[in-house]
Image (spheres, rainbow, N blue to C red):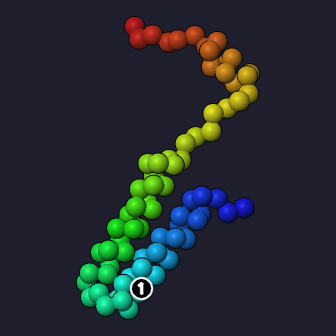
Amino acid sequence: MTGYYDIILGLIPLAMAGITATLFVAGFELTTAIPMASVVTVGLIGHAMFVRAPVDPVPSDASTQQTAQSDPLQTAD
């Protein structure tokens, strides 16, 4: 099953190449089109890292939570 991060990984090179080519055909210089396309790709990467950040799943098993709470704390001597 294709997930969000798989789609982002596919969109990064697609956006970079597609937007650069579109801007170049539209009349922009290549030295202008590449940085403009990279702004979009950096936005995709930033969204994947900070807006929909990958997080560790929280265990929903009650026994896991109980064993973590019942362990005594070790203090330094």
* Quadrant placement of the C terminus: top left
Q: Quadrant of the N terminus?
A: bottom right
Locate residue 42, reporting x and y percent. Answer: 38, 64
Position of residue 65 measured from the top left corner of the image (x, y, whole percent): 67, 21
> From the viewer's perspective, is residue 69 above or below residue 44?
above
Secondary-structure class at tag 1:
helix
Taking depth in this image into account, of 39 and 72 the one nearest to the observer is: 39
Where is residue 44, by image quadrant?
A: bottom left
User: Which residue, given by chain and number where applicable, does mark 1 sit on?
Assistant: 22
**Amino acid identity at mark 1:** Thr
Q: Residue at 32%, 79% (x, y): give it.
A: 34
Pick the residue in front: 19 or 12: 19
Q: Tell me residue 76's x, y (percent).
A: 41, 11
Please tell me which residue lies in front, 32 or 66: 32
Q: Farthest residue in the front direction?
A: 26
56 versus 48 height, above or below = above
User: Is 54 on the left or on the right of 43, as rendered?
Assistant: right
Q: Quadrant of residue 4?
A: bottom right
Above or below 48: residue 65: above
Q: Residue furthest top?
A: 77
Front residue (pair 48, 55): 48
Residue 56 position in % (x across, y down): 58, 40
Q: Residue at x 53, y 64 (%)?
A: 8
- Is residue 71 shown left or right of residue 34? right
Crowdedness near tag 1: few (<14), some (14–19) or many (≥20) residues, C-alpha within 10 Å: few
Kindly identify the residue that appears in the image at 29 percent across and 75 percent down. Answer: 35
User: Which residue appears at 74% of the width and 22% of the height?
Assistant: 63
Q: How many marks?
A: 1
